[in-house]
Image: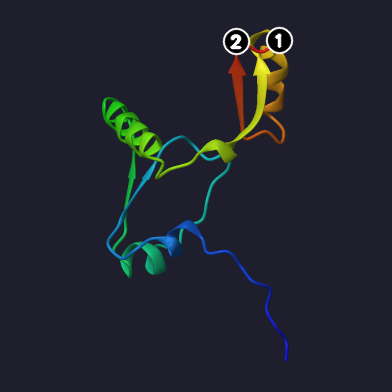
Amino acid sequence: MLRRPRREPTLFEALRRESTLVTVGHPSRPTDIDIAAHINKKGITLRGIFGRRLWDTWEQTMLLLDSGRLDLEWLITHRMPLGQIDEAVSLLTGDACKVLLVPSLR
């Protein structure tokens, strides 16, 4: 019996029916979305953030972080002193996800 390799669900597959997905930031390349399967059949609302709504989003995010319901620590791939800002920017064009500049680091 052949087994197919296990595939992680896409973000859209992980969403509940009639949920709202809010995007923040811009992907590095175009992304494919199966409109029929994810938007129409599941009734998902897809929203982007712009302008003043961004501040409300930050406040909601801070509430989630402070409550412990959301952990974003895994996104930070590097911590560097402020003096290494040029190296930090260079990392962002490669494999780094988020580079955190910490002024107190030496």
Judging depth in this view, the residue of 68 and 29 nearest the camera is 68
Name the quadrant of the C terminus.
top right
Q: Is residue 54 above or below residue 88?
A: below
Residue 103: mark = 2
Q: Name the quadrant containing residue 83.
A: top right
Label 1 amino acid?
Arg
Q: Which mark is residue 68?
A: none
Q: Amino acid at mark 2?
A: Pro
Q: Secondary structure at mark 2?
A: loop
Question: Could you tell me which quadrant the N terminus lies in?
Answer: bottom right
Residue pointed to by mark 1: 106
Marks 2 & 1, CB-CB < 8 Å contact: no
Residue depicted at x 46% and y 34%: 25
Count up the numbered dots: 2
Position of 32 relative to 9 (above/below) = above
Marks 2 and 1, Cα distance to the nearest angstrom?
8 Å
Frontmost residue, 106 versus 77: 106
Left or right: 33 with respect to 51?
right
Looking at the image, which residue sits at the far bottom? 1
